[in-house]
Amino acid sequence: MKCLEKGDDMLTFLGDIALISAHTRSEYKPDHQYVFNCEYVIGKRLEMMPVPGKINLSGIDCDFQKIFGKQPIAVTLSNNHINDFGSQGYENTVNSLKRQGIKTAAGELLWIGNICLLSYMDLDSGNRLDRDFIFKKKVAHYQIRKAKENEDARIVVLIHWGIENDPNPTKRQISNAHWLIDEGVDLIIGHHPHCVQKVEEYKGKYIFYSLGNGLFPPINQPSHYDSNGRPTRIYRFKWQKWNRKSYAVTIDDNAQVIKVETLVQTKDSVLKSTGDVDINRLILKKDYPKWVYRFRKYYLFFISNCFVDGKLFDIKAIKAEMNK
């Protein structure tokens, strides 16, 4: 990996950020311009109409500069929570980011120097004949071709995909990642599983299947609203050690990975760096056993819902889990 000269353009990618608590802070301060996945709606919950029947994440306006030492140059909004409070919540989020001078990546080409960011909410529905899948592939193909009209372009795909708490990427993730590289993408940055997944080098390009949670405090919010906007339960999720680890990936304007840093969020929701890590150590040859995912899923469910509000267990949580 080449050494960068002082003054070269560099960009850092962080994992899922959801500032849904006023108690979050970061001792980690990015040295360069940075981008993350905005995994929540920015706005006052009581002033927005929630989407019924799901987990709804929101937080009030936040000064990212106060937390990270500088504003992000951009965030991606292609995720499963940005529409938790409908179009109004989405507009509130975009407007809040605009007021802070922060760009948004949400389906369109976003240029930062010679780096072109493309942002997608997965590509694959599981059905290869599904019209939505075919449409997404056509859009991605067109956008990559458009970006490559700039001979100096280095294309980075930010993609929200995978299974929550599963340390292994799915076969469809791997297939779609290889397709993106074959199309001309230089680097893939994945989000959504709330834990880190392996890194792959494919045809000389790096695929980070999941960077994990960046700064994401435990969840304790009203959710599963009814059609009248009333919550039917409180959704609780207590992140464990594997959820509190993430990667910060820094590249130059040639999209070469120059540094991977390990970040850890403490139980008090403080984000810290534990230092650089050799990228070759992250390229795993074997998958984790399947029981690891099952253990994580049910252990997290149990630990998050026992001894709640003076009860041995949250009955509503059990019913919701059984109805999945």
Image (cartoon, helix red, strand yellow):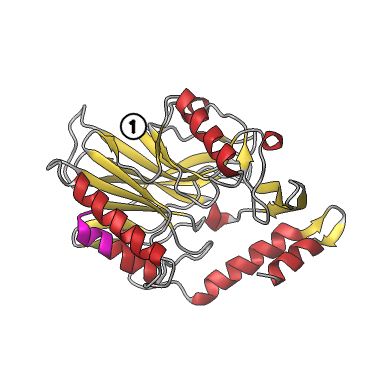
Give the residue pinned by disc 1.
32
Horizontal and vertical percent position of residue 28: 46, 35
* Left or right side of 256 for 166: right
Observer-nearest of 196 and 60: 60
Q: Secondary structure at mark 1?
A: loop
Q: Which residue appears farthest toward the front when viewing the image?
A: 131
Res. 252 in view: no
Residue drawn 32% across the image and 71% down it:
285
Horizontal and vertical percent position of residue 202: 23, 63
Q: Main secondary structure of the magenta part?
A: helix
Residue 24, by quadrant, is top right
The magenta segment is 179-185
In the rendered image, residue 182 lying in the magenta stretch gets the answer: yes
| Kind of residue at badge 1 | His
Residue drawn 64% across the image and 62% down it:
300
Res. 163 in view: yes
Horizontal and vertical percent position of residue 311: 86, 59
Q: Residues within 10 Å of mark 1 (few under 14, many from 20)?
A: some
Residue drawn 29% across the image and 54% down it:
140
Horizontal and vertical percent position of residue 316: 78, 62
Observer-nearest of 1 and 308: 308
